Image: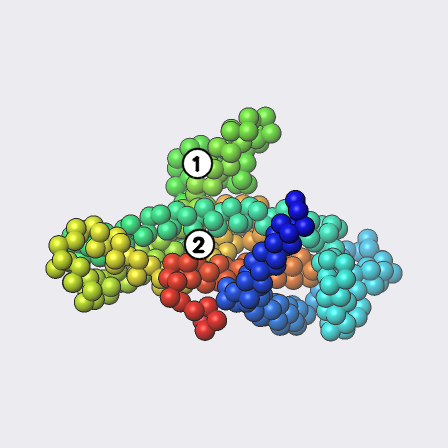
Amino acid sequence: MTATTSKSFWESSKDSFVRIVTSETFLYIVKRLLQALLTILLASIVSFLIIQLAPGDYLDNLRQNPKISPERIQELQEQFGLDKPWHVQYFLWLWRIISQGDFGTSFFYQRSVASLIWERVPATLLLAIASLICTWAIAIPLGILAAVKQNRATDRILQVISYAGQGFPSFITALLLLIFAQITTPLFPVGNMTSIYHAELSPVGKVIDILWHMILPTIALSITSFAGLQRITRGELLDVLRQDYIQTARAKGLPENRVIYVHALRNAINPLITLLGFELAALLSGAFIAEFFFNWPGLGTLTLQAVRAQDLYVLMASLIMGAVLLITGNLVADLLLKIADPRITLGKS
């Protein structure tokens, strides 16, 4: 490579780098990340304060054990830092995260909180993403079908299904599915995300085993979301189909499928993409219920155990992880909205 070629290469790379860092999308992502840091900081302060307002602490159960001496309780209190005021505990915890990336040690498990969280997050994300895919793959086509067949038998049946789905709380749906699993046992496994012989299976068998255990939790998590999304899709598409440009496209003799799936759906999809970030947050909160009923080893069951045991640092890390996933979901939704409609200006959103 000659000196001229090398210089030209570095100048081209520099120009590309400058274009990237000064682009609207990059600046928007940086701004949102800075906002996210402030949001997470404020959320952590409020969460820490609320947890501290709850009566008692993790050591209350140990104090009731006559075999544990008051001196040992005092040692544990100093070890966990529970002898300090709440604001001192918070700043020490925050400083450990900033300086060492250490979220503390679980009182109950006597393990690093970070390792516990990273063990559970994949299971929760797997359930939430599977539910999200199933929900959108079913609700969007049915919403389109209901809009196209407006006020016909198909539309009325789908409306009844959607209203019924929204009328059932997640825990009721989970209970009904547990009863169904009991009736059809051993067709649908309940409890944990793998079978007892999971380690003996082939790689393909392990994947099938996990997917088989996911069926009922995914259905429980998807029903309410599916019902709401199907109704929103129907309403948005009906609004677009009434627009003048749709009537013009039909008057030009365009095929009905092209009018619906190219012209109408492309404009009706934007509000649905906006809902994606909130949908992820709703799925995560719903996943806690599904995980509890089906004993799914995810973040929800870990958080519930932390609440019961007043395991402070595990609970804080779980809440922070939930906030991070919510912010990430909303950021992804905004970027997808920009991709779907280039006319949108991120800087003004």
Q: Position of residue 183 (x, y in %)?
A: 39, 37
Q: Dot 1, how many residues are within 10 Å of its Cα: few (below 14), some (14-19), or many (20+)? A: some
**Identity, as a three-letter code, of the amino acid under mark 2:** Phe
Looking at the image, residue 77 sits to the left or right of residue 257; the answer is right
Of 311 and 299, the residue lying toward us: 299
Residue beneath disc 2: 171
Residue at 52%, 65% (x, y): give it: 23
Residue beneath disc 1: 188
SS under mark 1: loop
Q: Earlier in the sequence, mark 1 or mark 2?
A: 2
Q: Quadrant of residue 79?
A: bottom right
Residue 340 makes an appearance in the image: yes
Residue at 73%, 58% (x, y): give it: 101
Of the 4 image quadrants, the one containing the C terminus is: bottom left
Looking at the image, residue 279 sits to the left or right of residue 23; the answer is left
Looking at the image, residue 116 sits to the left or right of residue 145; the answer is right
**Identity, as a three-letter code, of the amino acid under mark 1:** Phe
Of the 4 image quadrants, the one containing the N terminus is: top right
Of 231 and 313, the residue lying toward us: 231
Q: Is residue 201 above or below residue 191?
A: above
Q: Is residue 117 above or below residue 71?
A: above
Q: Position of residue 78 (x, y in %)?
A: 83, 63
